[in-house]
Amino acid sequence: MKKLWLGLFIIMILVASCAGQKGKVIFHPGSEYNGGQTAKQETWQIIEAQNPYEIPEWVSIYLEGKVLENGYRQIESLDQFSGKYVFIGESRGDNINILKQWANGYSTVQDLPRLIAPRVERRLVAAASLYPDDEYGEYFVSMIRKVSDGEYYGALKELSFWVKRQLVPNEDDDEDDDEFPQTDIPLVTERYEYFVLISVDREALQKQLREIMSNVRLSVSVTREQAAAIARVQNTFFEGF
């Protein structure tokens, strides 16, 4: 139930933050969880790549869905990202030129907050024994909103990479076709996927998030129990972040 609540809340935050931004390409918020896998656990194989002879390790980890299991920690453990937090934005489509334009225009100022906010939210939810709005009161929503609106110094758009992947037919597809009626929506079996990796100095981001946490705590009214829960999560926030 907690996971369902989290998914619905992320959608509401992202819809609100994107209001009035017509035509803007937005990364897939679910990508960080499953590396492109869907609920049916579809399998996709790379058939083309920016450099077909060497897929970067951070891309391989991301596509394997390991971010779902342990967040970005496995990528951040690579030597090249020592002392940094990393965040990956993703866009998909059938036109590589449009995706290249999206990647070239990807901004640490405008786009990074939308990558940080879900990560902050998951940390708060993971630490809660109740529903987050019960556990933290007004602090929870205010914290996510402030993080989403923040500006983060020390961030670098370090790397980008694209692949083209093809859907591997599933043996159960024939059975599914018999069970569900056909629709007019075309089935996507090939797609380009473009990834942009942004890094932030670990100490710098921790400092900024601590400032946001402190400012939000002073701006909201909470119960004694909620204040205690907020104090606990603030003291251990970066353990497992």
Image (cartoon, rainbow, N blue to C red):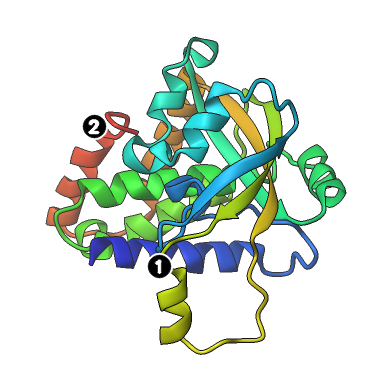
- Give the camera-side residue of 84 and 203: 84
Q: Residues within 10 Å of mark 2 (few under 14, many from 20)?
A: few
In the shown orientation, is residue 169 left or right of residue 198? Answer: left
Q: Residues within 10 Å of mark 1 (few under 14, many from 20)?
A: few
Disc 1 and disc 2 in contact, CB within 8 angstroms: no
Q: Which residue is mark 1?
A: 172
Name which quarter of the figure residue 55 lies in: top right
In the shown orientation, is residue 10 left or right of residue 108? Answer: left
* Residue at 40%, 44% in the rendered image: 120
Q: Nearer the viewer, mark 1 or mark 2?
A: 1
Q: Which mark is residue 34?
A: none
Residue 223 placement (x, y as % from top left): 18, 60
- Give the camera-side residue of 137 and 57: 57
Residue 205 vs 137, above or below: the answer is above
- Give the camera-side residue of 40 and 222: 40
Query: Is label 1 in a helix, a strand or a loop?
Result: loop
Query: Is label 2 in a helix, a strand or a loop?
Result: helix
Q: Amino acid at mark 1?
A: Asp
Q: Residue furthest bottom?
A: 181
Residue 99 placement (x, y as % from top left): 79, 48
Residue 134 placement (x, y as % from top left): 21, 64
- Asked if residue 226 can be seen in this view, the reply is yes
Q: Amino acid at mark 2?
A: Thr
Residue 66 placement (x, y as % from top left): 39, 37
* Residue at 54%, 44% in the rendered image: 115
Q: Which residue is mark 2?
A: 236
Q: Earlier in the sequence, mark 1 or mark 2?
A: 1
* Residue at 33%, 35% in the rendered image: 70
Residue 81 vs 36, above or below: the answer is above
Q: CA distance from mark 1 to mark 2?
A: 45 Å
* Residue at 42%, 62% in the rendered image: 171
Name which quarter of the figure residue 56 lies in: top right
